[in-house]
Image: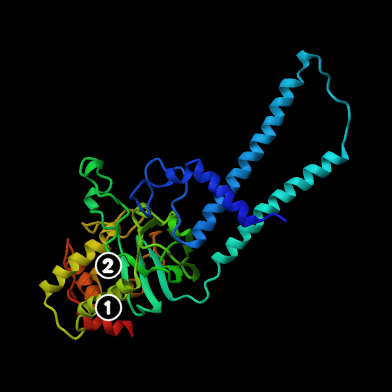
Amino acid sequence: MINVKRLQASMLGLAMTAGLPALAQEAGVQGRPVELQLNLQQPVTQIAADVYNLHTMMMIICLVIFIAVFGVMFYSVFKHRKSLGHKPATFHESTAVEIAWTIVPFLIVIGMALPATKTVVAMKDTSNADITIKVTGMQWKWGYDYLKGEGEGIGFLSTLSTPREQVGQPGVAPVGQRSENYLLEVDNEMVVPVNKKIRLITTANDVIHSWTIPAFAVKQDAIPGFVRDTWFKAEKIGTYRGNCVELCGKEHAFMPIVVKVVSAEDYTKWVEGKKKEMAAKADDPSKVWTLDELKSRGEKVYNTNCAVCHQPNGKGVPAAFAALDGSPVVTGPKAEQINVLLNGKKSGKFPSAMPEWKALSDTDIAAVITFTRNSWSNKAEENIVQPAEVLAARK
């Protein structure tokens, strides 16, 4: 019997001797792609290490087969060419050869499939998780809700933090002046403790997204109306980066994923700090705000969450995203606009659905609605929405 683990280890050692992992990551760089990368990112989970080993093993097997087949073929052509007086054979079949070319590939495939199947089965085992996090994809950001384990009750949105004016503007931010993690940085990272099994439940609000961290060997689609799950257990403290890898619209390239792996003590501190931060942001829904207060706050909420689709001037994108400037929903009864913000809008003449924004606080929803009803050319009769109205609409 072939010792698969010993074969994998020896092949991985051969690859390391050849210097392949050195090409996968620059010194001092962790958890993100690098220039001239020729291999997978350095693994920081057991599953990722297994995938790395499988990749190396199968690449070597394929290389050996390639060299053997083409070596025999070119040798035969060169040594048995007509100019040397060789004549073609006249036999029609060879039972031994037919048996050999059936059995040998079968054994090779079985030898490759067994360790691969073991790894795939392990990828699907989400049982006995220490922490469960719901991941929601939306155009174009990620929502994280900690459902079970330490940190339960924490929820936040994670959005690209590279300044919008630098994105796609060649003259604004020359390569030498960009941050090290340009387009791979967010305002709120997912934070998890090291050496803990993290179960991820993925879904989406609008279209199909895909949550991916290469260093974890995790890639899980987030599909509207479906709940799927995966897991990882990071064995090294650090920050690891990925992207949505399912084409999801015009801002698909700008919804990065950042996971920060910390010690158990630092994670506890983060949980305590995050809960205090959430409590501080939880405004009293019974407070009555002035129009100017709501407009000022609403403008910030709009620029962070809405401007990417509806544009800063409220004009939207023709045939893609609805204009808010002059919109009958924005200038009409406020109850309808509150309903759209809370529950989304899945149909209409625009192909891109409006996602629900229940993750925003009552005050933020009231503020952004008030801002849109009093901006650009809009002059709605019902021009102010209070947080208490949003709270009542949630029930």
As helix, strand or loop, the secondary structure at mark 2 comes to helix
Which residue is under mark 1? Answer: 272
Q: Residues within 10 Å of mark 1 (few under 14, many from 20)?
A: few
Closer-to-camera residue (109/312): 109
Drawn side of residue 238 relative to residue 14, left or right = left
Give the number of the mark in front: 2 or 1: 1
Residue 302 vertical position relative to residue 4 in the rendered view, above or below: below
Residue at left 34%, top 50%?
29
Drawn side of residue 293 relative to residue 336, left or right = left
Q: Quadrant of the C terminus?
A: bottom left
Tell me the kind of residue under disc 1.
Answer: Glu
Residue at left 18%, top 65%?
299
Expressed as whole percent of the image width and height from the top left, the position of residue 352 reads: 39, 60
Q: Quadrant of the N terminus?
A: bottom right
Q: Residues within 10 Å of mark 2 (few under 14, many from 20)?
A: some
Chain-order first, disc 2 or disc 1: 1
As helix, strand or loop, the secondary structure at mark 1 comes to helix
Tell me the kind of residue under disc 2.
Answer: Pro
Quarter residue 36 falls in: top left
Residue 16 vertical position relative to residue 328 in the rendered view, above or below: above
Expressed as whole percent of the image width and height from the top left, the position of residue 69 reads: 69, 35
Drawn side of residue 313 relative to residue 242, left or right = left
Q: Is residue 226 visible?
A: no
Residue at left 60%, top 48%?
58
Which residue is under mark 2? Answer: 328
Q: CA distance from mark 2 to mark 1?
A: 44 Å
Residue 261 vertical position relative to residue 13 in the rendered view, above or below: below
Closer-to-camera residue (47/170): 47
Quarter residue 198 falls in: bottom left
